Image: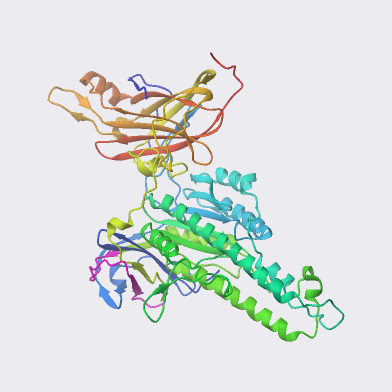
Amino acid sequence: MMIAFCTACWGQASSGPADSQSNSSATFKISTHLAVADVVVTDRHGVLIHGLTEKDFQVLEDGEAQKISSFEEHTGSAGAAPAPTETALPPDTYSNVTLDKRNAPLFIILLDSLNTALADQSFAQSQLLALVQDLPKGSRVAVFRLGSGLSMLQGFTEDAAELTATIKSRKASPQLGGFFNDPNLNFALNAPDLTAGMGGGSGGVSHTLSLQDASEAAIASDVVVSQTIRALKALGLYLSEFPGRKNLVWMAGSFPVDIIPNTNGSGQESSGLAGAPDPFRGDRMYTIAIRDLALLLQSGNIAVYPIDVRGLFGNGLFNPAAGSAGRASANVQGAAQSLTSFAGETAQIQAIMQTLAKETGGRAYYNTNDVKGSIMEAFNDGSNYYTLSYVPKNQKWDGKFRKIRIQVEREGCKVYYREGYYAEEPDKLKHSFPSPDPSMKSAMLRGSPAVSAIGFRVHVKPEGGVRTIAATEPTLKSRDDKATPHLTGPVVHYTLEYVIRPSEIEFISSPSNLYRSDLAFSAIAFDADGKVLNSSVGVFDRPLSAQVYQAVEREALHMRAGIDLPPGKIYLRVGVHDLNTDKVGAFEIPLEVETDAKVAK
């Protein structure tokens, strides 16, 4: 990376400055040998309660009372609008200076196409659009999709217009999951034939066919469960890199895994799966994978809010789409069995939703058409909570599951909370999600929240037309820790000019009247899938004379760098890291690299 330093002032100068059974929730993580909980408390009507003190809480672990070490209340209405601190920027200039420097919670919308019918996906999309219009400014929201894999539709943003455009876009439109099984329609089409005995075909081969169908269904179920676990793990690893509370709003029509183990009589752990008992599944359990997922959500401080986007729905027995299966007949017993099976499966899905919510600090929402209201309630929960910590009296870190009980010693408070955590050694809870720039870690990940501990501006300008290059050596590694592919073919060279106020960084003076900062600059170009296309990184540690330092104090520090970008949609992540204070500033710039110009030789 070539970095140029100049003191002349550039551009414009900146000016100054559902289900309501669960009414409180907690999320635990382990840091060193300290247990930390984010606790949401409401009254019996679901209204958030503020103003509680440390004395109002009691924590028990495996039945033994614990002493609270620290306590803090967080308040807000799904994010607060940051006060503008900079005037309108010049053309092609971007900044993180207007961002609020609070450590606000993050909200993640997961649109699940794998486990949701097309019609229900459309309903969820319409409810999400209605929500965005009313979302308080300052809420940091990202949108992901779970389909054949996990994909990022929108990185973290506070811009409601940007969120609206993403949700309306083609990439967010409903998709049919590869192995999706609509339980409502499937129930109707496979309901007992109530016209039996009134003139119909023979059922002599039905038993053989049902066994074959059951085997195929078991294979499909395995694929869905494994894909869901892999996607949640990938999302958990990504989110675990960011500090503070993360609120995952999972919008789906079915939830295929229960993340918390059930302890049998012998004390061994086993995990449950959604759906009726499957004779073909046999020993195909996901205990290890689900335990790892639970541990990841626990240590990453990720609260899950599962929302059943089917809303209010019937059993489908008398659905006209079922044809003869929906007509009345004498097979009343078969109909009763089918209704019982439907009720059991529905209850099991709702129980899994409750477990997902309780054991991660969220809330479950089902049996309601007000999906918009459910999401808004989840956002308010995630912005209004108490953080408390304690040092567990049991200091034996053997990996076993410990049960937790949190009580609020005040009348009218209804409390439910995470039932425990895995007592793993702190070092074992560290997860590795390779960053394209290790020096800045999560700040330089594609789509990650903007960071404003260091405020700065960047002017992005193309230099010349499109040119063709043979190859460039990779300077960074991509997320999967593989070498960045050589950038070949047509590219456009862009000049990046960083502008940083001296108050944002630290200068250290020397006896010889020199002033020195130690800054790392990074620019990384991604495609929409998070693949690293090119990068430009470097360090500025040049000593400044007293005269130059005074000029920087009057104006700003200007740094210039360059990067080659291929034509098309590019997400350019820029960042500054003060190595003296370890403060970081970073944000993302969407660019459309034009290809109209002639190719330069």
Going by the image, does 460 lie left or right of 27? right
Going by the image, does 447 lie left or right of 390? right
Q: Nearer the viewer, residue 7 or 400?
A: 400
Going by the image, does 563 lie left or right of 319? left
Question: Can the viewer see residue 276 in this picture?
Answer: yes
Residue 398 colored magenta? yes
Question: Can the viewer see residue 40 in this picture?
Answer: no
Q: Nearer the viewer, residue 367 or 424?
A: 424
Q: Residue furthest right?
A: 199
Q: Residue furthest top?
A: 601
**Residue 339 in the image: x percent, y percent?**
67, 79
Q: Residue at x 81, y 71 (%)?
A: 323
Q: Residue at x 56, y 60 (%)?
A: 223
268 vs 90: above or below: below
**Residue 490 in the image: x percent, y percent?**
55, 23
Going by the image, does 242 lie left or right of 137? left
**Residue 481 in the image: x percent, y percent?**
40, 41
Q: Quadrant of residue 457?
A: top left
Q: Quadrant of the N terminus?
A: top left
Q: Quadrant of residue 552?
A: top left
Q: Nearer the viewer, residue 372 or 389?
A: 389
Residue 205 colored magenta? no
Q: How many marks?
A: 0
Q: Which residues are magenta?
A: 389-412
142 vs 565: above or below: below
Q: Residue at x 25, y 39 (%)?
A: 581
